Image (tube, helix red, strand yellow):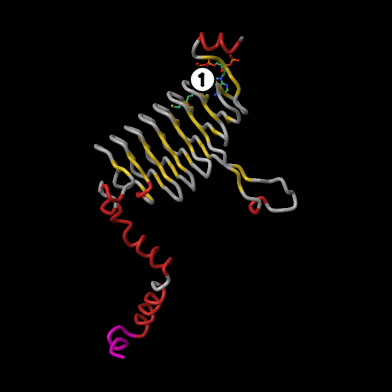
């Protein structure tokens, strides 16, 4: 009763509702998450216990959005800029040395493992999901803006069942060293892009790309070769 007198009936009801809600574990977690969000960068300091691994000279910019840091490994000099999202949801993420996620770049594990080698860049508005099959990206891979790399497909075999109910498949995607993906490229599930390949802006990569090839179009086909020796070998 003293409580009622002190706060009035309206405030008391709000306090009661809050007290009941925060007894539900999920709600409690969400409330904490929201309440603590402004202190995000204090919650994710470069404390080795909060990360799977954290190297020297790593930069996690103040407004970067990190989730499940315990499944994220950041090697020396890795850099996640403001407004980039790096989320290890049901999988793991590794950024190799000096790999750089620019603002609004999105890297999510989504149930699989995402591994970047050294000196990779993920430019603004890229969407990169590991999914069950996972994603392996080599060293020095340049990923231009608005590129989408998602290693999964919906199953749609049964025309009488909604696609959303038919599940998904995921084989995984592999990208070799020194590959350049131009702006707006889409890489489909199961594809392997070999060392030194260049993918032209706007391409949809549905099949494996040989090393040192320059591919483009929808679906992507070889436009030319970067290396005369490799071209001669391929022509045989
Ligand atoms: C792939 C790319 C590098 C090729 O450049 P290039 O070596 O100067 O090649 P060319 O312009 O001589 O083009 C070679 C052929 O590929 C074709 N081609 C070039 N870019 C293409 C594209 N994006 N999609 C489809 N075909 C393309 C050309 O029409 C040409 O065909 P042709 O021989 O029948 O005339 C360039 O076209 C490209 O897409 N760059 C990406 C730019 C980008 O995304 N920048 C973001 C910042 S990282």
Where 220 sits versus 227, above or below? Answer: below
Where 160 sits versus 185, above or below? Answer: below
Which region is colored magenta? 1-8
In depth, the one of 57 and 204 nearer the eye is: 57
Residue at left offset 44%, top offset 50%:
89
Residue at left offset 31%, top offset 43%:
53
What x and y, as percent, mark residue 149?
51, 37
What x and y, as percent, mark residue 220?
59, 26
Crowding at dot 1, Cα within 10 Å, few <14 / some 14-19 / many 20+, comes out as many
Tell whether 169 sits left or right of 65: right
Tell whether 80 sits left or right of 126: left
- Badge 1 marks a residue whose secondary structure is loop
**CB at mark 1 closer than 8 A to ligand 1?**
no
Residue at left offset 37%, top offset 45%:
72
7 inside magenta stretch:
yes
In depth, the one of 104 and 215 nearer the eye is: 215
Q: Quadrant of the C terminus?
A: top right
Tell whether 38 sits left or right of 109: left
What x and y, as percent, mark residue 57?
24, 37
Give the residue furthest to the bottom: 1
Which of the 4 image quadrants contains residue 123?
A: top left
What x and y, as percent, mark residue 40?
30, 53
Give the dominant element type of the magenta stretch: helix, strand or loop: helix
Where 203 sits versus 65, above or below? Answer: above
141 inside magenta stretch:
no
Give the residue furthest to the right: 160
In depth, the one of 42 and 88 nearer the eye is: 88
The residue tagged 1 is: 211
């Amino acid at each position: 009763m003293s409580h009622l007198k002190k706060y009035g009936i309206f405030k008391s009801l709000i306090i009661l509702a809050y007290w009941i809600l925060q007894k539900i574990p999920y709600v409690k977690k969400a409330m904490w998450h929201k309440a603590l969000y402004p202190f995000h960068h204090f919650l994710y300091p470069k404390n080795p216990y909060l990360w799977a691994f954290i190297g020297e000279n790593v930069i996690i910019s103040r407004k970067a959005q990190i989730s499940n840091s315990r499944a994220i490994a950041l090697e020396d000099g890795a850099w996640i800029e403001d407004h980039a999202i790096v989320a290890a949801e049901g999988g793991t993420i590794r950024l190799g040395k000096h790999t750089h996620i620019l603002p609004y770049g999105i890297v999510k594990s989504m149930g699989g493992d995402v591994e970047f080698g050294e000196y990779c860049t993920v430019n603004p508005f890229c969407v990169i999901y590991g999914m069950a099959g996972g994603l392996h990206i080599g060293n020095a891979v340049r990923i231009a803006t608005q590129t989408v790399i998602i290693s999964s497909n919906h199953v749609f075999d049964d025309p009488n069942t909604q696609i959303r109910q038919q599940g998904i498949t995921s084989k995984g995607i592999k990208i070799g060293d020194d590959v350049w993906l131009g702006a707006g490229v889409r890489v489909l599930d199961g594809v392997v892009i070999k060392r030194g390949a260049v993918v032209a802006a706007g391409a949809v990569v549905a099949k494996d790309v040989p090393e040192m090839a320059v591919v483009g179009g929808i679906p992507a086909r070889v436009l030319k070769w970067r290396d005369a020796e490799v071209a001669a070998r391929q022509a045989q």
